[in-house]
Image (cartoon, grey):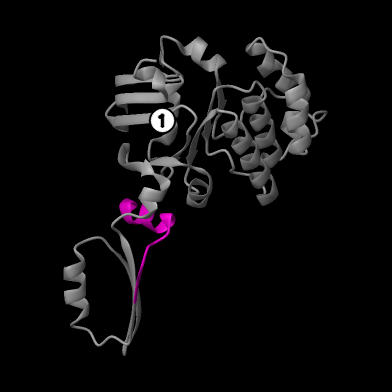
Amino acid sequence: MSGTEKFAIETRKLEKYYGRSRGIIDIDLQVPRGDFFGFIGPNGAGKSTTIRSLLGLITPTGGEAFILGRECGRSRTDILKKVGYMPSESCFYDGIKVKDMIKLTAGMRGKDCGQRAAQLCDRLCLDVHKRVDELSLGNRKKVSIVCALQHEPELYILDEPTAGLDPLMQQEFFTLLQECNDKGATIFLSSHVLSEIQRYCKNAAIVKEGRIIRKGSVKELAQSNVKRVELTTPSGRESFLYSGEMSKLISQLAQKELMDLTITEPSLDEVVMHYYE
């Protein structure tokens, strides 16, 4: 297996500009096959631009990208057959019934997914006889989930997939993803909900203003050199994040009249917010 084929997703200096406006800059990613990978960033950070560039839905300005060993863009048709893609916003044909939309997307891949689709609809409590434009946001999301998962691809690329789902459906959705991952599929999850990333992902990358600013295992990202400091003085209680030499911190704290002091590991949410700020 070549270097590129070892990864479900690999990019090298991937860039996308919209005229003079920044989309993404120098995106270097390696997502091993079988990984459950989180792509973390606020709205506008470049997550969707990266995903659309990978799938050949937009043309990058520069760099290279590969999915399952195939070059993105040139091999778009072959790639899309092996990928389950769920966009952040679900758009369907007006007036079409749920069952027909699901059957249509299966037919595009030349597969009979009826049995798997029925299982997914049952687990997500989705009424297949309704028209898609009559559904709530949450139920339209369910249709998108079934369309992305029913053909049991090698790679799932999911862009903000849980927006609009109630907590019970979110839990069931991640149970489905975990089952797919346990069978060997790769999950690439774009999200700004950090609790999802920390709970389910093995590795992750943090993107800010179109650039990846940190990447590694979720455990490593959460256990960075950033510390949460909480202290109490006669004037009140203070709490802040600190990333620097411990000796300097202790030297500064020694000048205060401390009544209580706690230094702990922050949550992943706090670490990511620290990098954003």
Does residue 27 appear to the left or right of 6 in the view shown?
left
**What residue sits 36% from the left and 15% below the top?**
2
Tell me the crowding category of disc 1: few under 14, some 14 to 19, or many 20 or more residues within 10 angstroms, Cα based: many
Residue 142: % across, % down = 68, 35
Q: Nearer the viewer, residue 9 or 276?
A: 9
Please tell me whether mark 1 sits on a helix, a strand or a loop: strand
Q: Position of residue 39 (x, y in %)?
A: 43, 39
Q: Is residue 114 left or right of residue 234?
A: right
Q: Is residue 143 above or below residue 59?
A: below
Picture coordinates of residue 199, whole percent (x, y): 52, 49
Question: Label 1 is placed on what type of residue?
Answer: Val
Q: Which residue is mark 1?
A: 31
Q: Residue at x 55, y 17 (%)?
A: 82
Does residue 270 belong to the magenta stretch? Answer: yes
Q: Magenta segment range? A: 262-277
Residue 110 visible? The answer is yes
- Please tell me in which quadrant of the rendered image residue 242 appears: bottom left
Q: Quadrant of the N terminus?
A: top left
Which quadrant of the figure contains the C terminus? bottom left
> Residue, x 33% and y 56% (percent of image)?
274
Residue 98 shows in this picture: no
Does 1 appear above or below 197? above
Is 272 contained in the magenta span?
A: yes
